[in-house]
Structures are given as structure tokens and as C-alpha cells.
Image (cartoon, rainbow, N blue to C red):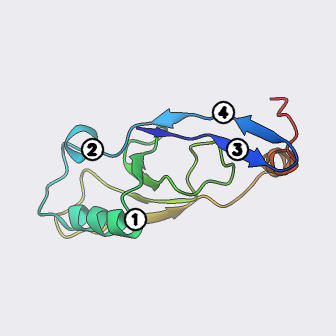
Amino acid sequence: MYYVDAIRVGFTTRIYSGGRTEKLNIPKHLPWLDPASQQAKDVERFRWFSRDYLAVDSRDRNLIVDMRYSMIPNEIDALWGIRLNPSASAAAHVGYQTNREPSPERLQKLKRMLYGEPLTD
């Protein structure tokens, strides 16, 4: 289980509580994935690259995300991940997906956190 909180330390300390999600468990989360397929090999490569900090995106069960990086530090909203396709051929690769387009509201939230201000939303 991953618990995603943020702590801002300076002259004062502020804790920003976040969410939690399960660590990737392929038999549980992707029971359809053929271990001999290219997608399974790609998952293992991504596991190595992300040092095994993987989870399934809560909004898209076919998207595996790197839990280490998010635009907002206490949110489970990964900057990148890989998209699997249950109907892909055994030779098909996964797709790579990024999430790096911040909205003005998200940038304002990050700024408030960096300055140690309370979040109003």
C-alpha cells in the first residue's frame, strides 16, 4: 500500500494529507496479462525503471503509473505511466503516457504548498 502525503518543513511544518492506493499486483490487477507477452516484458522494464514504485491508476485500470512523481506532492496523479491493452497481440508493446499539463488552479495549489500555506479546497 502506498500512502501519499506531503510535508513542508521550514520555519514551520505543515502536513498535507493525501490519498492511498495499492501497490501493483499483476495477478490481482491485470489477471488477463499473458506473462509471455511483450506487454508483460514492458511492465517488467517499467518496474525496473521506476524501482518497483508501481500502481494502477484509479481512473483507468489499464494504466500503470510511477508513484514517485506527481505535479502535486500529496496527490496520486502520476506524471507518467504505461498503458496496456487487453486485446493487443502477444507482440504488441505498451503505450507510454505523460501527464504534465498543469492547470492554473493546480499551479496555485502547488505554490500554496511550497509556501506552507493552508489549502482551502
Q: Nearer the viewer, mark 4 or mark 2?
A: 4
Residue 7 locus on image (x, y percent): 70, 44
Residue drawn 66% across the image and 61% down it: 100
Given contact means CB atoms under 8 Å apart, are the residues at marks 4 and 2 in contact? no
User: Is residue 85 rendered to the left or right of residue 102?
Assistant: left
Numbered badge on residue 105:
none
Q: Nearer the viewer, mark 4 or mark 1?
A: 4
Q: Considering only order in the chain, which callout, 3 or 4, is on the residue closer to the N terminus? A: 3
Local crowd size for mark 2, using a 10 Å CA cut-off: few (<14), some (14–19), many (≥20): few
Residue type (three-letter) at the residue carrying disc 3: Ile
Residue 28 locus on image (x, y percent): 23, 38
Marks 4/2: CA–CA distance:
25 Å
Of residue 44 and residue 85, the one placed in the foreground of this image is: 44
Given contact means CB atoms under 8 Å apart, are the residues at marks 2 and 1 in contact? no
Q: How many numbered marks, from 0 up? A: 4
Residue 105 sits in quarter? top right
Q: Nearer the viewer, mark 2 or mark 1?
A: 2
Given contact means CB atoms under 8 Å apart, are the residues at marks 4 and 3 in contact? no
Marks 2/3: CA–CA distance:
28 Å
On-image quarter of the C terminus: top right
Q: Which residue is mark 1?
A: 95
Q: Which residue is mark 2?
A: 25
Residue type (three-letter) at the residue carrying disc 4: Ser
Q: Considering only order in the chain, which callout, 3 or 1, is on the residue closer to the N terminus? A: 3
